[in-house]
Image (cartoon, grey):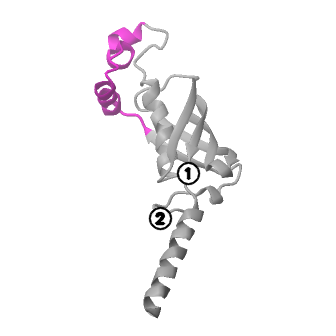
Amino acid sequence: MNILGGYDIEDFTVGMNATFSKTITEADIVLFAGVSGDNNALHINEEYAQVTQFGGRIAHGMLTASVISAAVANKLPGPGAVYMSQSLIFRAPVRPGDTVHATVTVKEIFTDRKRVVLQTTCTVKGHAVIDGEALVKVGSRQPAAAVQAELDRIRIAAKSA
């Protein structure tokens, strides 16, 4: 693990997984609309949304997908990871009050490039609402070990002087 508690490339095995969960609130939807500028009536106008195919308001797809980002940032790979890409397939709507469970699973490891491919899935009540795949860049213990070795060499040289 790195100094922030995230995984280094040497820590990964195919199949490793982690989940982060969040209940999508009314406040989340309103704040996301304000921050993103996405004021689609499907998200903020109940009267309009009731006459659509969804029969009521739904959360923004990208708000729901942001739970994947939280799983990547906080769980696997965790702190220090850099998102490089994310594909998303929206399978079902998420409504205010739904709890979204984002699971990330290591699918491929590219040790030489310090990159990991993650299968990403969001579920609500056991049903997939988003599927996708992420490419994430991570760190390595090797540079940290080289830096530590150099510091040790300097300390030894200083003691000898």
Density class for disc 1 (Cα within 10 Å; few <14, some 14-19, many ≥20) is many
Q: Nearer the viewer, residue 89 or 128?
A: 89
Provide the residue designation for mark 2: 3
What's under tag 1, amino acid-wise?
Val
> Main structural element of the magenta stretch: helix, strand or loop?
helix
Locate residue 8, reporting x and y percent. 58, 58
Q: Judging from the image, what secondary structure is the residue with disc 1 in?
A: loop
Provide the residue designation for mark 1: 138
The reply, left or right, for residue 38 in relation to residue 71 is left
Task: Count up the numbered dots.
Answer: 2
Of the numbered discs 2 and 1, the one sitting upstream in the chain is 2
Q: Nearer the viewer, residue 154 or 79?
A: 154
Locate residue 82, reporting x and y percent. 50, 45
Q: CA distance from mark 2 to mark 1?
A: 13 Å
Looking at the picture, does residue 16 appear above or below residue 30?
A: below
Looking at the picture, does residue 67 appear above or below residue 152?
A: above
What's under tag 2, amino acid-wise?
Ile
- The answer to whether residue 72 shows anywhere in this view is yes
Locate residue 31, reporting x and y percent. 30, 30
The furthest residue to the top: 51
Residue at horizontal 44 percent and vertical 26 percent from the top: 95
Residue at horizontal 61 percent and vertical 30 percent from the top: 131
Residue at horizontal 64 percent and vertical 41 percent from the top: 117
Q: Quadrant of the N terminus?
A: bottom right
Which portion, as a residue range, is magenta? Answer: 23-51
- Answer whether residue 109 is magenta in the image: no
Q: Nearer the viewer, residue 113 or 127?
A: 113
- Answer whether residue 32 is magenta in the image: yes
Is disc 2 in contact with disc 1, using a CB cutoff of under 8 Å?
no
Q: Judging from the image, what secondary structure is the residue with disc 2 in?
A: loop
The reply, left or right, for residue 103 in relation to residue 70 is right
The furthest residue to the bottom: 160
